[in-house]
Amino acid sequence: MIEVENTHNWGSGALYSAAALQEVARAARRHGLPLHLDGARIWNASAATGARIADLAAGADSVMVCYSKGLGAPVGSAVAGTKAFIQEARGARKMFGGAMRQAGILAAGALHGIRNHLERLREDHARAKRLARALSETEGLSLDPGEIETNILIAEVVRHPERLHDFVRAVASQGVLVAPFGGPGRFRAVTHLDVDDAGIARAIDAVRDAARSVLLR
Ligand SMILES: *Cc1c(COP(=O)(O)O)cnc(C)c1O
């Protein structure tokens, strides 16, 4: 099978356009391979491109979506596919201990996310870009803000990359969480509905302070 993750976590939240996905779908069909779309962040790809979810999912044999990332539900994911695929998935879910009779309360959170939090994903993207610009201007760090398309950014510690973990701890001591991620010396930051403009300003200050005290000394 072929699996595509849209948006792509390790790619700093990079997205596939509907046209690019169609090309992958054609290649999959040509080789007789099913295409699975890991759309945990498909909402972000849609918000960033303006493409409809249906168009981003067209050509995939199965699609999963996640309600607990950008949409902000406490928990919950869903998978879509053919009737036969879903029947098989239900069996697999039961075998792995994932069956749940009281799933309505989870569905309610997911519905709330779909109804109220789709539009605002663009705010997360704008804030990620703002954070990326500030980080790109921070001495000791490197990233290209032009590459940030959605709500994930991966930056690199270029001055004393071996101090990455100390740097991450110094940022965390100011209440801002970034994670070592994406390769040696790299860390990831994600914007979401609990981070407002003031939060971004705080994150920028925390990262700059940590860079000064940990990387530039
Ligand atoms: C979050 C995520 C999932 C699924 O998450 P669950 O918590 O298991 O619902 C799948 N793929 C990607 C890329 C994700 O980020």
Image: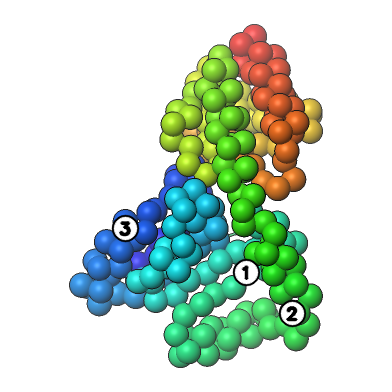
Query: In 3D space, how far apart are the residues under numbered discs 3 and 2 (Cα atoms)?
Result: 35 Å
Quarter of the rendered structure image containing ligand 1: bottom right
In this image, 47 relative to 170: left or right?
left
The local secondary structure at tag 3 comes to helix
Sequence order check, earlier mark of 2 and 1: 1
Which numbered disc covers residue 19? Answer: 3
The residue pinned by badge 1 equals: 77
Report if residue 67 is visible in the image: yes
Q: Residue at x 75, y 86 (%)?
A: 101
Sequence order check, earlier mark of 1 and 3: 3
Marks 3 and 2 in Cβ contact (< 8 Å): no
Task: Identify which residue, 147 or 95, lies in the foreground.
Answer: 147
Q: Nearer the viewer, mark 3 or mark 2?
A: 3
x, y (%) of residue 205?
71, 21
Please, is residue 203 above or below residue 190 in the view? above
x, y (%) of residue 79?
54, 75
x, y (%) of residue 144?
45, 28
The residue pinned by badge 2 equals: 103
- Give the quarter of the image for residue 96: bottom right
Please, is residue 163 above or below residue 172 in the view? above
Q: Amino acid at mark 1?
A: Ser
Q: Residue at x 49, y 56 (%)?
A: 46
Q: Residue at x 64, y 85 (%)?
A: 94
Q: Amino acid at mark 2?
A: Ala
In this image, 61 relative to 78: left or right?
left
